[in-house]
Every structure is written in structure tokens, then in C-alpha cells.
Amino acid sequence: MAKLKSFDPISGKEGVAYAKINGNNEELFFAKTIEASVEKAKSEIKAIGRRMTGHKTTGMSGSGKMTLYYLTPLFRQMLKQYKDTGVDIYFDLVVENNDPSSSAGKQTTLLMDCNLDSVVLTKLDGDSDDPLEEDADFTFEDYDILQEFTKIQ
């Protein structure tokens, strides 16, 4: 049985993220948090003589969110391009967890065909001494785990 060692949990600060937009890699150095999840779509299955409702998985949907420091025009430019031309931009997102102190190693996840749901257009905050941040929600249409964490012994 594996025993958790205090150095093995992954630090959220150790890693990197890239957006692949129109063939170019844009490092998301201005990202504070990135999270993506898959939600399963299910149909209810009811049957005579069965008191409990069953559930059949019928599909999946991917969505994510990023909290960014408000210092890059990247996503506002993408939104403006759609406004001006009607051509929406889809991009891939590569997220790599790589905590060198953990024996779990590295995990690299590819989110494919990401599309922004919302973008902060402008922001001021006279009530805060903290740096400005913005949230960007997105959906994605597929994913792959390019490299998995290693099994901890």
C-alpha cells in the first residue's frame, strides 16, 4: 500500500500553461489560476419494479475558468476579432503540472478547441490595493492527457 509522503502533493505554483493560437504558442505567464473539468451528461432510466432511478451516461461537456492578472490584451484582441470579422477563434490550451519536489512527476494535459465564453473588456478598482485580475470562462471540445503523473509507491 502506498504511503503519502509530505513532499508528494503537487504544488499549484509549479507548472506552466500555453495557449496555442493560430499556430503560435503564447505562454500564459499572467495566469493566476487555471481549472478545467468535464461534466458527464446523463439520462434518467426508470423501470417498473425498480424504486431507484438509474443513470446512463450519454455524453460529456468540457468547461474551464482562468483567473488572470489584468495586463495582457490577448483575449480582448480575440474578442475584438470576432466582433469585427465574425470569425471566432478557437485555441488549444496545454497545462503542465511539474512539481520537482514530488515523486509523482509531471502531468501534461491538452485541452482542444477552447473557446472563450466571457472576457473582461475594461476594469478599474479604486477600492483595492491588490493588482487587477480578470476571470475568463471557456469551453473545450476535447482533451488528452499527454503525460500522466507516475504512480507513487
Image (cartoon, rainbow, N blue to C red):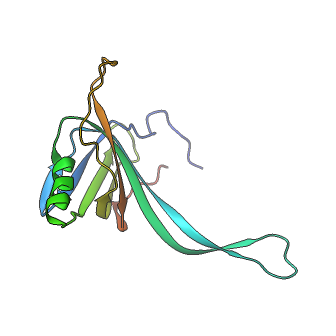
Residue 112: image quadrant is: bottom left
**In the displayed structure, does residue 13 sit left or right of residue 19?**
right
Q: Is residue 149 visible?
A: no
Taking the view exactly as shown, the residue that stands out farthest to the bottom is 48
Is residue 119 or residue 140 the one in the foreground?
A: 119
Place of residue 22 in the rendered image (x, y in percent of width and height, measured from the top left):
13, 63
**In the displayed structure, does residue 9 sit left or right of residue 50?**
left
Q: Kindly identify the residue that appears in the image at 56 percent across and 47 percent down.
A: 2
Residue 139: image quadrant is: bottom left
Place of residue 92 in the rendered image (x, y in percent of width and height, measured from the top left):
25, 61
Q: Kindly identify the residue that appears in the image at 34 percent across and 18 percent down.
A: 127
Q: Kindly identify the residue that appears in the image at 27 percent across and 25 percent down.
A: 131
**In the displayed structure, does residue 62 sit left or right of residue 122?**
right
Residue 67: image quadrant is: top left
**In the displayed structure, does residue 58 sit left or right of residue 108?**
right
Place of residue 19 in the rendered image (x, y in percent of width and height, measured from the top left):
21, 54
Place of residue 144 in the rendered image (x, y in percent of width and height, measured from the top left):
35, 66
Q: Kindly identify the residue that appears in the image at 14 percent across and 55 percent down.
A: 25
Taking the view exactly as shown, the residue that stands out farthest to the front is 84
Is residue 91 or residue 125 the one in the foreground?
A: 125
Taking the view exactly as shown, the residue that stands out farthest to the right is 49
Q: Where 132 falls versus 84 (above or below)? A: above
Q: Where 108 falls versus 67 (above or below)? A: below
